[in-house]
Every structure is written in structure tokens, then in C-alpha cells.
Image (spheres, rainbow, N blue to C red):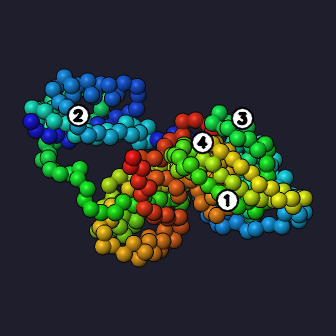
Amino acid sequence: MGLSAVTVLGVDRPGVIAAVTGSLTDCGANIQDSTMTLLGGHVAMMLLVSGDLDGEELLKRLRAADLVVTASAIEARRHFCEDGGGLGYVLTVHGPDRPGIISAVSAVLAADGGNITGMSTRLTGRLYVLIADVELPKEVDVAALMRRLAAVGASLDSEITFRPVEPDLL
Amino acid sequence: MTGPGGRPAPAGPPGVLRAPHPVLSAVAEPVDPAAPDTVAAAAALLAALRRAPATMGLAAPQIGLSRRLIAFDTGLHPRSRSWAGERVLANPRLVGASHWDHGREGCASIPGLTADVLRATRITVHGHVPGTGEAVTIEADAFEARCIQHQLDHLDGLLFLDRVPGALSLHIRLHSCDA
């Protein structure tokens, strides 16, 4: 059983997900992790699937008219769901839209070994919003990092908040 | 103007500032509840609230006034339980908060987006009535409590976006109930 990463991009319409997942089922592929959203009126979907077919064969057999599909074999990373020992934070950036917001903010996080584990950005009117889940190594000086983030936010005319994740574990 | 998902950007209520705007990020100034300009500002805020369809609350910064005034009326919202009526409060302060829960909220200043935000579902707020200056205490729960906390955030220069609990909690708006 191999693992393949499948990406799907196409114009949003009812039935896109049903068509893609039905075709994967016909290929004997089992969907493990997946995420889907709408970007600019387009469906954007990423899936991790397991099965006997390799990426090339999957691509040949996926019936997905009008959709741009890619599939490639990837290696399973063991223990990828385990707690990495980092600290979870949520980053919010909002302000006027301009090029370079994500790169400027992510560079500050990366310099301290911060890992963005999830991100969503939206543009509505002039307002650009970025929300990111961030995992920080335990040894990071969070106060210093927040000062650097605030400086970047000021240079972008944007508001930045950076706060610990609120765990809802029951 | 472009909105989320490439749609045309939805329009906000008339007279209500849209983010990004510096007044929406500023800490608002305390007011003298009995001062004539406070009464005028309160009247303008209430008029803006009444003009805004499906909007249950507004704070003075949203109409360009960096003053600690909020207005709300959640009587028509389906998730309301307590209802203090149509209210304008000067210098409101949160003095009690408990029973926290996530709930979806939007903002008249951010048309097009909503998010799941953690708020207290039972609160106590102190404030003053513009004009008379009478001190009032409001006990609120459910949606009214959420709405009041949302407006209090505006007075401190905060938007609901600053309280989004994670990347998956931001949503394109599918309904029209503003906090």
C-alpha cells in the first residue's frame, strides 16, 4: 500500500467533491487526510490517499472533467501525529492589503524555528486577514518574538495579535 | 472591490466604517455621560444602529467616534435569551464574566467574514445612561452577552479577528446576523 498526494483545482460547482472522491473510490484508493476550501471561486482540495495504485496510475484513472489534478507518490512520515513538544500559538494579522504580508510575517516566525501548521487568509474589500496556527520550540523567547512581530505589523500598517492556543481538551 | 472567494465585496451598513481603519484599531476615550456632545454622539450611534439591517450592536468607533459608547438591541436575534431592550451605554465596563463558549459572530465593519470566538455567556456590565448619567448594571447572557463583549472590544481597538482561536475558525459569511 503506497501513499499518494493528490491535488485538485477547478471552478466551484455542486458535485465536484462527489466526482473526485467517487473516482478515487473506484480506483480503490482510501482517503486519509484531506482539506478543501474555496479560493477565488475555485475549489482547492488536497488529499493524502493510500492504495495499490501509484501516483501516475491514479492520475490516468481519475475521472475529473474540467479539473486540474496532480498526483504523486510520497513517503509516509511515521509518528507525524505525535506531540512535537512545541507550544501552540495563534497568529492574527489584519490590515490593508499589500504584497508581502505572509512572507514578512512567516520570516519572523521561521527565524525562531516557528512552524506554521495551518493558515487561512482572506481578502474582503481592502481588508486582508491572516490567521495562522503556529508551533514554537519551547526555548523561544516569546516576548522578544512578539516584539519583532509587532514591528513587522507596524511596517505593514497591520494589527498583529499572537496568543497561546486555548485548549479545549475534555 | 473583491470579497472572500473572489465574490464582489459585500457592502456594510451605511455610515459604518469598514476595517481597515485607524479609528477601529484605537483605544476609545472615556466620555462625560451628561455632556451635550456625548448625548449627540449617543443619538448618532443609536440612529446608525437602527439604520443597519441585521445588526444587533454598534460601538462609537464604528461610526468614526473614538469614544466609549456602545449601543445594542438583540431582541430580534434567534440566539438571544436575556434582553435589556434597546440600550446605549457610556463608559461601559465588564465587571463579571463566566460560562465561556464558542459562537459564530460577524461584524458590521467586516462584511464578508465570520469566525468562531470564545466569549463569556453570562456577564455583568456597569455603565452610565447618556444624558442623565444614571449608573446602570446589566446582567446579560447568551447572544446579548456576546454582542456586548463584541462592542466592548471595539472600545479597546480590538476586532473579533483578534480573538479567532485558529486557522480553521475563520469563515466566509453565509448568514446575516451581526454581533
Q: CA distance from mark 3 to mark 4?
A: 23 Å
Q: Position of residue A49 (x, y in %)?
A: 19, 36
Mark 2–mark 1 distance (CA, rounded to whole Å): 48 Å
**Quadrant that contains the C terminus of chain B:** top right
From the image, state whether disc 2 or disc 3 is nearer to you.
3
Q: Which residue is mark 2?
A: A31
User: Which-is-in-front pick, marks 1 and 3?
Assistant: 1
Q: Position of residue B68 (x, y in %)?
A: 74, 62
Amino acid type for the residue under numbered disc 3: Leu
Same-chain check, marks 1 and 4: yes
Secondary structure under tag 2 reads strand
| Number of the front mark, 4 or 2 | 2
Q: Residues within 10 Å of mark 3 (few under 14, many from 20)?
A: few
Residue type (three-letter) at the residue carrying disc 4: Pro
The amino acid type of the residue labelled 1 equals Leu
| Residue B2 x, y percent position in the rendering | 53, 46
Marked residue chain, label 2: A
Q: Which residue is drawn at the image coordinates 54% and 40% (left, top)?
A: B173
